[in-house]
Image: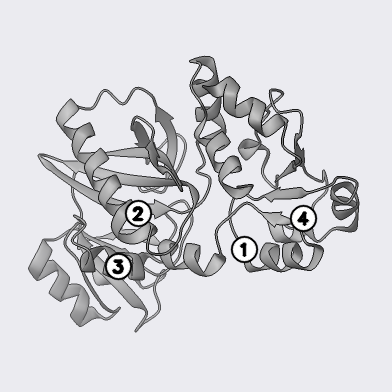
């Protein structure tokens, strides 16, 4: 199957350019003769839109017919440059990805669609609301603001004063209880023919030797060794999320969902509406096991 889709991509009239601003997120695909990574050794700003705006990068792209720009993450600047140069943009509109990345709006969106989430409420960050959260949820409170990366918008606190250096007064905040458990990720691809899910991965989070942030993910493991009933429930929640939220938004291609398993409860934590940090590693696992990579389906989805 992977050879069939690889042949289709190789025989297409398109040339794929993957924008690389972090070497840890690069991917090597010698199987695709029309796929290459674009990067600059001395890029001043680690930003895909900034990389794509460089004259030397654009000169490389313009040597090929039917370029397809493949960003790790969507941005308005990439959209603008692709439209200006008549290049295909293999990512979703940034207005959609920003909505799904917004921790507050994501919570509201899932709540409206009955997706299982950790109980929470949204309110301005004040001492009154922090104490209200403790009364509802217990002493350990997790706060999240609209946007963040690698857990930097998520904080655990026992006291209001613990957060004063991180959150400005009146900042719109999601307050929720801290729950013990473990985290799973599944990589997915939504195509016009349906949803494809990977087996879940166990996420290594907050290992003190690697990070001081208890919410930062530092590694993943396949197989997850999670109970089959947990895997089946994750598959079900993912399918519902795709049908109720992603499809109405006309989302296409690769995405990842993070879950928390706490005792017998399974909660959706967040959506990464883009290529995930594990996508390159997972692609190599798929190829080694003679599976069609989700990334191939992602590429194929944007060239019709």
User: Which quadrant of the view contains residue 185?
Assistant: top left
Asked whether the viewer can see residue 46, the reply is: no
Residue annotated with mark 1: 75
From the viewer's perspective, tell me whether residue 198 is left or right of residue 130.
Answer: right
Q: Mark 2 or mark 3, which has the lower sequence index?
A: 3
User: What x and y, as percent, mark residue 11?
Assistant: 72, 31
Tell whether label 2 touches label 4 (CB within 8 Å).
Answer: no
Neighbour tally class for label 3: few under 14, some 14-19, many 20 plus, Cα within 10 Å: some
The mark found on residue 109 in the picture is: 3
Tell whether label 4 touches label 3 (CB within 8 Å).
Answer: no
User: What x and y, as percent, mark residue 3?
Assistant: 59, 20
Q: Mark 1 or mark 4, which has the lower sequence index?
A: 4
User: Which quadrant of the view contains residue 156?
Assistant: bottom left
The mark found on residue 51 in the picture is: 4
Q: Secondary structure at mark 1?
A: loop
From the viewer's perspective, tell me whether residue 151 is left or right of residue 138.
Answer: right
Residue annotated with mark 2: 270
Neighbour tally class for label 1: few under 14, some 14-19, many 20 plus, Cα within 10 Å: some
Query: Residue 301 versus residue 164: which sits nearer the camera?
Result: 301
Neighbour tally class for label 2: few under 14, some 14-19, many 20 plus, Cα within 10 Å: many
Q: Nearer the viewer, mark 2 or mark 3?
A: 3
Real-space Cα distance between discs 2 and 3? 11 Å
Q: Residue at x 78, y 44 (%)?
A: 39
Neighbour tally class for label 4: few under 14, some 14-19, many 20 plus, Cα within 10 Å: many
Q: Residue at x 19, y 66 (%)?
A: 120
Real-space Cα distance between discs 1 and 3? 21 Å
Real-space Cα distance between discs 1 and 4? 12 Å
From the viewer's perspective, tell me whether residue 107 is left or right of residue 24.
Answer: left
Q: Nearer the viewer, mark 3 or mark 4?
A: 3
């Amino acid at each position: 199957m992977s050879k069939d889709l690889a042949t289709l991509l190789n025989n297409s009239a398109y040339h794929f350019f993957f924008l690389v601003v972090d070497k840890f997120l690069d991917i090597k695909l010698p199987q695709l003769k029309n796929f290459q990574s674009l990067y600059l050794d001395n890029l001043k700003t680690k930003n895909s839109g900034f990389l794509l705006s460089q004259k030397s990068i654009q000169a490389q792209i313009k040597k090929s017919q039917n370029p397809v720009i493949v960003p790790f993450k969507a941005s308005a600047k990439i959209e603008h440059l692709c439209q200006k140069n008549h290049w295909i943009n293999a990512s979703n509109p940034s207005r959609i990805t920003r909505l799904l990345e917004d921790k507050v709006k994501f919570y509201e969106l899932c709540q409206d669609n009955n997706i299982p989430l950790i109980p929470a409420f949204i309110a301005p960050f004040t001492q009154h609301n922090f104490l209200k959260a403790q009364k509802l949820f217990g002493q350990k409170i997790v706060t999240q603001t609209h946007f963040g990366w690698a857990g930097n918008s998520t904080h655990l606190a026992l006291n209001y004063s613990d957060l004063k250096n991180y959150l400005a007064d009146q900042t719109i905040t999601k307050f929720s209880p801290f729950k013990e458990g473990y985290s799973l990720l599944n990589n997915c691809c939504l195509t016009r023919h349906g949803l494809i899910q990977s087996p879940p991965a166990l996420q290594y989070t907050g290992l003190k030797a690697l990070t001081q942030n208890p919410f930062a993910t530092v590694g993943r493991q396949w197989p997850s060794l999670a109970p089959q009933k947990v895997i089946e429930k994750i598959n079900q929640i993912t399918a519902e999320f795709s049908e109720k939220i992603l499809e109405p938004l006309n989302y296409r291609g690769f995405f990842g969902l993070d879950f928390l398993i706490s005792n017998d409860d399974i909660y959706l934590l967040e959506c990464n509406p883009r290529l995930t940090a594990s996508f390159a590693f997972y692609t190599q696992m798929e190829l080694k096991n003679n599976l069609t990579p989700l990334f191939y389906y992602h590429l194929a989805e944007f060239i019709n």
